[in-house]
Image (cartoon, rainbow, N blue to C red):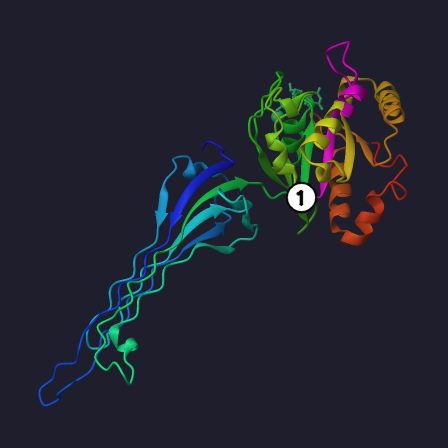
């Protein structure tokens, strides 16, 4: 199915039913008094997150989701039936905003999370509620309140622990294929990947993390170059970024250092918080060079970038170094949040050349 990560929908809760005006009429009971029941409440509209779906494609056609109306009250103190609530199922990671006020109404990140988006109208009072010592045969009734109506915007941000970042052709999809069961297309032209792919990376028994592969990023993406930067939203929930760099680019004029910097600039333009996430450099395609030259190039790139975070020299194609990379990612994710924050600060940054194999 087509991947869609933005949608607009309208939701309309049910109206409350009208209260009833009725009087008790019974043999041998004169002046039976008012007995009009209340109207039923209108149904509400809720969103419910479910893990089975991973796109907003179902919402491509804008439509209105309506809950049921409450039924009118009846005589003999009968309350009207309430309108049925409506649960609209959305993918995990859906951020919900009111289109008019721009207010964020909720973020559904866990399976089964429920969010009320339009409250049903209360049923109106039946006439018996209006009786008093001075008005013993009231004819008033409550009309029932209208249900809430809203226009919503959904934005899907996939839920992953680690995100892959890099120029087109850096080898992101090749890496996720090598370490998980995800099967995104790999090809030697830029922008092969057009939407995010998620893969579960198993590291030994009962230890795993979720990796997100997104379309490649190029300089000027914030201004719309290439596929733009909108896909970066899918990295916002991750805790760690793996920045893939091709150390043996085909183009003789390509400069990996300049490219890394360009990507960091695009990250900052999109979201300063994203640019501050721990980012490890993954120098890829080592199989294309003799080992000594690959290591020499890696050293040069790291020195010129003054990269203080961790780095790895791998080949997604042959799998060399990918196991060590995944082990390190897993260990970093397992560390308590406080220790992680310390490790990613510049002072605590890991300057030792570990994981270089
Ligand atoms: N020799 C070698 N080739 C690689 C390696 N990793 C990727 N490639 C090749 O590089 C090309 C691009 O790989 P992809 O995995 O599609 O790159 P990507 O980063 O996902 O690219 P986009 O989806 O366009 O952003 C393909 O021809 C891959 O076969 C590697 O480690 N070694
Ligand atoms: Mg790709």
Magenta span = 237-261
- Ligand 2: give its quadrant: top right
Q: Nearer the viewer, residue 183 or 4?
A: 4
Whole-percent x, y for residue 321 in the image: 77, 32
Does label 1 point to a residue whose CB lies under 8 Å from ligand 1? no
Q: Nearer the viewer, residue 321 or 195?
A: 195
Q: Is residue 161 magenta?
A: no
Q: Nearer the viewer, residue 225 or 11?
A: 11
Whole-percent x, y for residue 122 in the image: 36, 64
In-image side of 157 versus 13 (left or right):
right
Whole-percent x, y for residue 127 in the image: 25, 74
Q: Looking at the image, which residue is at 42% across and 35% down?
A: 60
Image height of 245 relative to 242, above or below: above
Residue furthest to the front: 134
Viewer can see residue 315: no
Residue furthest to the left: 27
Q: Looking at the image, which residue is at 65% across and 40% down?
A: 236
In-image side of 4 versus 71 (left or right):
right
Whole-percent x, y for residue 353 in the image: 89, 34
Q: Quadrant of the N terminus?
A: top left
Q: Looking at the image, which residue is at 31% across and 62% down?
A: 144
Task: Please name the residue that numbered disc 1 is placed on.
Answer: 161
Q: Is residue 255 magenta?
A: yes
Q: Looking at the image, which residue is at 75% across and 40% down?
A: 277
Viewer can see residue 189: yes
Q: Nearer the viewer, residue 20 or 282?
A: 20
Image height of 53 relative to 250, above or below: below
């Amino acid at each position: 199915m087509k991947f869609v990560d933005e949608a607009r929908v309208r939701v309309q809760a049910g109206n409350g039913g009208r209260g009833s005006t009725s009087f008790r009429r019974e043999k041998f009971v004169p002046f039976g008094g008012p007995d009009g029941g209340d109207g039923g409440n209108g149904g509400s509209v809720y969103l419910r997150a479910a893990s089975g779906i991973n796109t907003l494609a179902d919402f491509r056609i804008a439509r209105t989701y309506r809950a049921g109306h409450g039924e009118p009250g009846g005589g003999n103190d009968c309350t009207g039936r309430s309108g049925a609530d409506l649960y609209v199922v959305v993918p995990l990671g859906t951020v919900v905003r009111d289109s008019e006020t721009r207010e964020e109404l909720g973020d559904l990140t866990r399976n089964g999370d429920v969010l009320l988006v339009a409250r049903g109208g209360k049923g109106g009072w039946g006439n018996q509620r209006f009786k008093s010592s001075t008005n013993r045969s009231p004819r008033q009734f409550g009309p029932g309140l209208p249900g809430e109506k809203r226009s919503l915007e959904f934005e899907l941000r996939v839920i992953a622990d680690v995100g892959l970042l890099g120029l087109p052709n850096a080898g992101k999809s090749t890496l996720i294929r090598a370490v998980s069961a995800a099967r995104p297309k790999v090809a030697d032209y830029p922008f092969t990947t057009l939407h995010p792919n998620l893969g579960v990376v198993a590291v030994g028994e009962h230890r795993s993390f979720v990796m997100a592969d997104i379309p490649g990023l190029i300089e000027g993406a914030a201004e719309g170059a290439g596929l733009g930067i909108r896909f970066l939203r899918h990295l916002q929930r991750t805790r760690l970024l793996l920045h893939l760099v091709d150390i043996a680019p085909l183009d003789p004029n390509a400069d990996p250092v300049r490219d890394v910097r360009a990507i960091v600039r695009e990250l900052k333009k999109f979201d300063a918080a994203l640019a501050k996430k721990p980012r490890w450099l993954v120098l890829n395609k080592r199989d294309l060079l003799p080992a000594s030259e690959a290591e020499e190039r890696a050293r040069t790139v790291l020195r010129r970038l003054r990269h203080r975070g961790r780095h790895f020299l791998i080949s997604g194609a042959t799998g060399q170094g990918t196991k060590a990379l995944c082990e390190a990612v897993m260990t970093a994710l397992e560390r308590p949040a406080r220790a992680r924050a310390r490790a990613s600060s510049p002072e605590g940054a890991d300057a030792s050349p570990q994981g270089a194999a």
